[in-house]
């Protein structure tokens, strides 16, 4: 948490036109500034920034707000991250709190160490760039390789801030030590190694690819060996540190995020040069997992900008196998998936050289497939007329279908699968049902095993407020319980008087009683207990010892903390209830879908009308949350 005083200190120092001017080209227009919308394609500027009112308005997309809203919309930062960004830009030191407790000395020391790491990475980037452009070795080995051998243009090389690590064993380390950096700091940054009382550079005779975080800071490097006959690895990366975790970053996301937002989909490729090659061809909504498998954290990063992902890996055997492994993971995270499959075994680098700027987009669209069609093409290419492999192929498709949450998509994909596999739709539905039952039985076995765990261990798990729950609905129910326990007595303004948070929550669930109720019986019981005290006008906490009533004692209030500002608690409450309604409707839609699949004689027209009505209601709620697409 950032205190109210710290927040005002930051916002009072901010010039909104300066902050937005870092992302949008603004021109003075009377008292205001005007520019092209960063959220839509337009030729006439309709994006207005008012320095006097400290607000912005984009008339082409309808978006607007203050400087915090801009950073949240454009950079996909949350509220606290936006304040941190502004504090860093205007060199303001902030004293953050977690759960109401100030950072201790250990936390301040960690932040200072991270600051030094960022400085070292930035110094190394400048050193590598200097070597590439201003030394004979860099020009001969580095630039010659990039321009003549790989076909990259100078503007792309500069926009990605590429550099060159010289052949010398200690060149970077010696220069960094002269600048005042400590040897131990250089080792922890992944730039220097130390062995047998000698230090040496980790990167030598390599093209250097700086890796940026979302705000543009350099967090690490990838180095490409320019000698393909060398016994050393073709690519090496910085060792992991507190600022660089390979499974949590995507190469090219900083350069591509605006285009991903505009295009509303993201290409995922395998390597650094694949990203650069596509950028050079005009495809700028592209990122790379840098040689590692796409992780859940990678997908979460992409979902900040779009829910639509296109896998574009190399067309060789290893690239195809890597793609097949990703399908279920991506579908499991409810993302819309397409896969580029080029029959000639080409890769992003080769395809970008083969086609012109005007034709490459249409080629990629023409050769992109949904997951069933892609798996069909792989089956036809490698496993045709093999019954065993065909049965495995069928099971893979069913596994993918079981991950799809969208009702309409599941129905349409079932129809598509039936055509491709030449099987009756009813048979696929039956097998899908068996698969789901098997998963449910496994879940029941896990739950029965949990019941055999000693009572003390179970109690510890119950009291752990940060235990991961499978259902987002259950997580929000826990947040509602925490909210009413800690802030139930807090008064909010309303027309004609005031209302407490506890009363507002009680009114909400009484009004929605026929359509919405808690999934968890435990949560429903806790909520009812709290509400009964509210009705009797008793405090939620006992006034004598400031402890919760006995029936709520399993909730350890000492460990309850909220990461939002108390000044925004009403907005937080409204958003929480809207999110709960949205997820609850999704839950009902899924139940309706399951019922329809299992009951073959159901009225199809009535089913589709019900689903459409529920989807319309959900979209209305999402509009209020500003998430409607």
Image (tube, grey):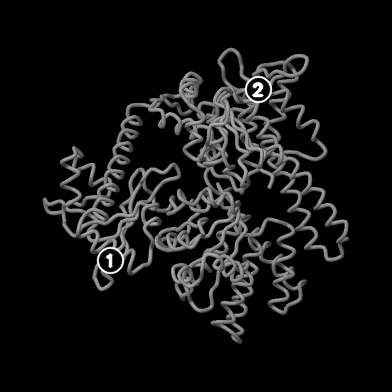
The residue at the point 78 percent across, 44 percent down is 617
The residue at the point 22 percent across, 50 percent down is 192
What secondary structure is marked by label 2?
A: loop
The picture places residue 543, in percent across and down from the top left corner, at: 60, 13
Tell me if 208 is positioned left or right of 517 in this view: left
Q: Is residue 45 above or below residue 234?
A: above
Of tags 1 and 2, the one toward the viewer is 1
Tell me where residue 622 sits by quadrant: top right
Residue 532 disc label: none
**Res 19 seen here:** yes
The picture places residue 576, in percent across and down from the top left corner, at: 65, 34
- Give the labeled residue for mark 1: 226
Q: Is residue 172 above or below residue 398?
A: above
Could you tell me how far apart the alpha carbons at marks 1 and 2 are, in whole angstroms? 64 Å
Disc 1 residue crowd, few under 14, some 14–19, many 20+, Cα 10 Å: some
* Earlier-in-chain disc, 1 versus 2: 1
Residue 488 disc label: 2
Q: In this orientation, which residue lies closer to the viewer: 485 or 220?
A: 220
Give the residue furthest to the left.
197
Tell me if 467 is positioned left or right of 211 in this view: right
Disc 2 residue crowd, few under 14, some 14–19, many 20+, Cα 10 Å: many
The picture places residue 495, in percent across and down from the top left corner, at: 77, 18
Q: In this orientation, which residue lies closer to the viewer: 534 or 614?
A: 614
Q: Is residue 556 above or below residue 171?
A: above
**Res 464 seen here:** no
What secondary structure is marked by label 1?
A: loop
């Amino acid at each position: 948490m950032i205190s109210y005083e710290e927040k005002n200190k930051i916002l009072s120092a901010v010039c909104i036109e300066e902050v937005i001017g870092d992302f949008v080209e603004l021109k003075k227009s009377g008292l205001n500034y005007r520019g092209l919308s960063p959220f839509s394609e337009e030729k006439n500027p309709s994006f207005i920034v008012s320095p006097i009112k400290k607000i912005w308005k984009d008339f082409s997309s309808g978006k607007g707000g203050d400087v915090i809203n801009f950073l949240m919309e454009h950079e996909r930062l949350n509220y606290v991250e936006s304040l941190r960004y502004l504090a860093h830009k205007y060199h303001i030191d902030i004293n953050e709190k977690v759960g109401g407790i100030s950072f201790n000395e250990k936390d301040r020391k960690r932040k200072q160490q991270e600051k030094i790491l960022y400085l070292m990475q930035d110094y190394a980037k400048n050193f590598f760039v200097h070597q590439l452009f201003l030394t004979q070795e860099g020009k001969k080995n580095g630039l010659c390789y990039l321009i003549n051998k790989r076909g990259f243009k100078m503007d792309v090389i500069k926009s990605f801030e590429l550099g060159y690590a010289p052949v010398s064993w200690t060149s970077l380390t010696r220069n960094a030590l002269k600048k005042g950096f400590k040897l131990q700091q250089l080792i922890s940054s992944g730039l220097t190694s130390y062995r047998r009382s000698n230090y040496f550079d980790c990167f030598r005779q390599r093209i250097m690819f700086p890796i940026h975080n979302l705000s543009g800071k350099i967090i690490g490097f990838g180095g490409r060996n320019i000698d393909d006959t060398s016994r050393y690895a073709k690519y090496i990366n910085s060792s992991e540190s507190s600022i660089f975790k390979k499974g949590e970053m995507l190469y090219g996301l900083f350069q591509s995020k605006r285009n991903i937002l505009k295009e509303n989909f993201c290409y995922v490729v395998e390597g650094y040069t694949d990203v650069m090659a596509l950028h050079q061809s005009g495809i700028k909504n592209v990122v790379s997992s840098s040689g590692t498998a796409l992780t859940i954290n990678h997908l979460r990063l992409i979902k900040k900008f779009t829910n639509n992902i296109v896998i574009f890996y190399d067309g060789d055997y290893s690239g195809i196998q890597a793609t097949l492994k990703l399908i279920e993971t991506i579908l499991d995270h409810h993302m819309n998936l397409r896969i580029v499959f080029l029959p000639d075994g080409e890769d992003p680098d080769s395809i970008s050289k083969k086609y012109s700027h005007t034709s490459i987009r249409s080629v990629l669209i023409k050769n992109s497939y949904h997951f069933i069609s892609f798996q069909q093409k792989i089956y036809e290419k490698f496993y045709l007329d093999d019954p065993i492999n065909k049965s495995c192929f069928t099971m893979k498709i069913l596994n993918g279908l079981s991950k799809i949450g969208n009702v309409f998509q599941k129905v349409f994909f079932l129809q598509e699968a039936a055509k491709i596999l030449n099987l009756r739709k009813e048979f696929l539905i039956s097998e899908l049902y068996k698969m789901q039952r098997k998963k449910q039985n496994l879940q029941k076995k896990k739950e029965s095993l949990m019941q055999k765990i000693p009572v003390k261990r179970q109690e510890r798990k119950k009291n752990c407020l940060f235990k991961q729950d499978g259902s987002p609905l259950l997580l929000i129910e826990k947040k509602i319980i925490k909210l009413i326990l800690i802030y139930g007595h807090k008064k909010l303004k309303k027309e004609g008087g005031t209302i407490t948070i506890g009363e507002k929550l009680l009114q909400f669930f009484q009004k929605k009683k026929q359509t919405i109720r808690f999934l968890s019986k435990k949560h429903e019981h806790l909520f009812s207990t709290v509400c009964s005290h509210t009705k009797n006008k008793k405090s939620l906490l006992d006034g004598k010892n400031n402890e919760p009533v006995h029936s709520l004692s399993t909730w350890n209030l000492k460990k309850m903390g909220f990461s939002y500002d108390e000044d925004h608690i009403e907005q937080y409450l409204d958003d929480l209830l809207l999110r709960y309604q949205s997820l609850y409707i999704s839950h009902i839609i899924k139940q309706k879908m399951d019922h329809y699949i299992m009951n073959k004689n159901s009225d199809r027209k009535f089913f589709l009308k019900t689903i459409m009505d529920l989807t319309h209601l959900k979209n209305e709620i999402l509009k209020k949350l500003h998430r409607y697409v």
